[in-house]
Amino acid sequence: MAERRRMAYRVHREILDEEEVDEMAEKSDSKGSLTEKFKQSMKCSGPRLKSCLLDSVPLLSWLPKYSLRENALGDLVSGISVGIMHLPQGMAYALLASVPPVFGLYSSFYPVLIYFIFGTSKHISVGTYAVMSVMIGGAIERVAPDSNFIVWDNETNSSIVDIFTRDAERVRVAAAVTFLSGLFQILLGLVQFGFVVTYLSDPLVRGYTTGAAIHVIVSQLKYTFGISPKRYSGPMSLIYTVIEVCYLLPTTNIGTLVVSIVTIISLILAKELNAYLSKKLPVPIPVELIGIVIATIVSWQVNLDEKYGVDVVGTIPSGLQPPVLPDVSLFGQVIGDAFALSVVGYGIAISLGRIFALKYGYNVDSNQELIALGLSNAFGGIFQCFAISCSMSRTMVQESTGGKTQVAGALSAIVILIIVLWIGALFEELPKAVLGAIIYVNLHGMMKQFMDIPALWKSNKVDMVVWVATFIFTVLLNPDMGLAASIGFSMLTVIFRTQLPKYSILGQVPDTDIYRPLEDYNQVRQVPGILIFRSSATLYFANAEMYLDALREKSGINITKILSAKKKLEAKRKKLEEENAKKAKKAAKEAAKNNTAGTVRMTTDMKGEPEETEQKDITFIEMDPEPDPSLPRAIILDLSPVNFLDTVGVKTLRRIWTDYGEIGVKVVLACCQKPSMPEPGDAPRLSPQGVPYTDLQHIVNADGLHLFCRYWEPAGPPRALVFIVHGAGEHCGPYDEIGQKLKELSLLVFAHDHGGSVGHLFAITFILLIQEYMPVFLN
């Protein structure tokens, strides 16, 4: 490997704390009061009204600037191509939603036009989507199951399902859940809640869509085998459905199975050919459209419905449905499904929208997208559509065929309108097995998402666990319940990450001001006498106790044991002082009684040498032993990863400062983020200036100046200067009490605790202190 070129730099400036930095940089107070912000938001003016209107209806801002020369041809080709795709996908996904196929065409028309007016993405193709359809189908089957529409047939003397009444009721349920999901999206958009999609991580979304794809596949098995399994709902419904399908396999309709297999093989081969010729053809071959045309012709010529019992689409009414207000009485039964649909639909649409916005260099307004999708669903619910979102396959076709604006979406809606008004009836003989085969083939992209598992295992195992857990929840539970459980599990992983962060002791990279964890580097050395501790997560109530435990473990200081021993020694010292005070008081009384002049009597032995026999008025004070020399002089808490502090976090820092300070170890904060710093009244004074330092190097440098120097002012005019310099690697903690005692004797005490000799910087510091506190000695 070639040797990397190194560049050196040098910075010469004073050591600064946060307050000094704010003063030098002239920090501005940009925070306004809530009242001021409200008044500002309520101000109305002509330019502001115009801006608000253009933001609310994006069509008014971009349509006047539309360039026919640059965009018209690409949008026309793209619109026709996507419209052709809407036909088979709309009819197929309607079966997933448990409504007649024609309502899939309605859902490919009305919502697309509304998004054309209010949407901000130029490339996504909104409309029917497999995951949304299967979620709606689950809600419909739960609210309007077949068992609610069983009637007695006099001709066959048996009970049958009233299909027309059932389908009418299911359309009402679909319209209600769609309208309610649209209201949720509009409400979330108006309160600027577009950021909610951030709670849907990419592993969660991909695991969820893969699990929902399994539900889609299982729901189409009845059309593939020509059987009629019972539809289950609730947890484990997919497992029960698979068991039911396996039980009914002996009753498979061979004609239906042959149609399914032939269609699947044909579509796969056609798509491979399409991919091979993609660079040579200006537009992709509409294989699904060709497939349903051929299947319809064959079914009509061979009469598959009557001769072989192959289930076909049936009557497709021409024209559009009149608007109908949704049944409000159904809202209570589908409110959970509606909210899940609103979140999932928005999450998929905004994810794709941002991908193409980044690719082509424009912005997508997340809150306006919520409102646009909400209006599309609410308006579509009035016209008996089911909930829509963005389809990856149609979006890729719209982008690859030259679509550059939302006009392509409007043109695709016009294609659907033509089909609904004049062509729809031609597809009445289309076998449902063909629509199921189209769904299978279009899900191959979602099945490829299983390859995320080994990739995530290598890159991030926690994300891999989220993907797998989301997939399992979605498969075992209903898609709506699976989504809720998946979001909850994803949130738990975030909490666990903050509860179990990496704790490190930092050391200095030789000849630099860079600090790295000691356990991760071989050439990093700990600063003598200083312990730098860092957590990789923020400090709050959920991990505060673990922060204390990690600090005790990493520092090797059993603070509880040391404080307990110190308290016992302090109690013993106080007891001894009380006993000595009592003895002194008793001796004073006896001296007064005996009218004794002195308190110390000297006796002489036979050799004439003096001997001190008694001391009655002197108090003996037993000082604490010096701290363990292995203890650091200071602990620096690197708070650079901490982005907020709650009250528990502040109390934890205060506790560390107090406990370690009692054993002579200073605690200093470093690298605090401004939003995480507590209020001045709540912040413990953890540095000489009372505020944290800006970086680690400042504290290490401050050690050489005054961070670990101490002085005590005398009670009265000083009679002498006591100057104590303590040795390297030890502490001046015991001198706190010495200084307090000596200052009562009007002695000015200055103690310095620093390893090595007193250098130039220390000499300057001493002179400044003496000038301030001891001017009499300089004269």
Image (cartoon, grey):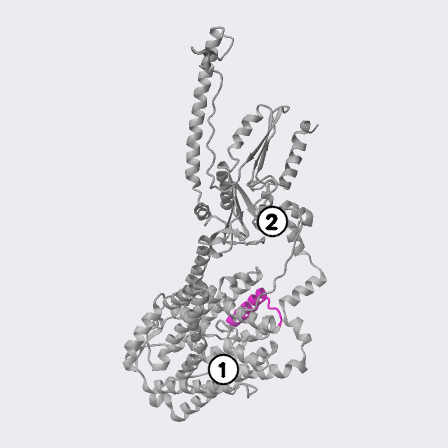
Q: In x, y percent, where is residue 251?
A: 29, 82
Query: Relative to residue 115, is residue 773 depicted above or below?
Result: above
Quadrant holding the C terminus: top right
- Does the image show residue 108? yes
Above or below, comparing residue 1 to residue 677 in the picture: below
- Tag 1, which secondary structure? helix
In which image quadrant can residue 358 be found?
bottom right
Please name the residue shown 49% across and 79% down the image. 105
Region rendered in magenta: 361-381
Count of numbered circles on the image: 2
Query: Which kind of residue does numbered mark 1 sit on?
Result: Leu
Please state which of residues 147 and 106 is positioned toward the viewer in this rendering.
106
| Residue carrying label 2 | 694
Q: Answer few, some or many: residues within 10 Å of disc 1's Cα (few below 14, many 20 plus, some between 14 and 19).
A: many
Q: Is residue 378 magenta?
A: yes
Magenta stretch, main secondary structure, is helix
Instruction: Please name whichever residue, 680 or 363, is drawn nearer the observer in this view of the structure.
Output: 680
Q: Residue at 45% of width from left, 21% of height from top?
A: 578
The residue under the point 48% across, 79% down is 90
Quarter of the image containing the N terminus?
A: bottom right
Q: Position of residue 454 (x, y in %)?
A: 42, 70
Q: Secondary structure at mark 2?
A: loop
Residue located beneath label 1 in the image: 87
Q: Is residue 744 left or right of residue 21?
A: left
C-alpha separation, residue under disc 1 versus residue under disc 2: 63 Å
Q: Residue at x 29, y 78 (%)?
A: 248
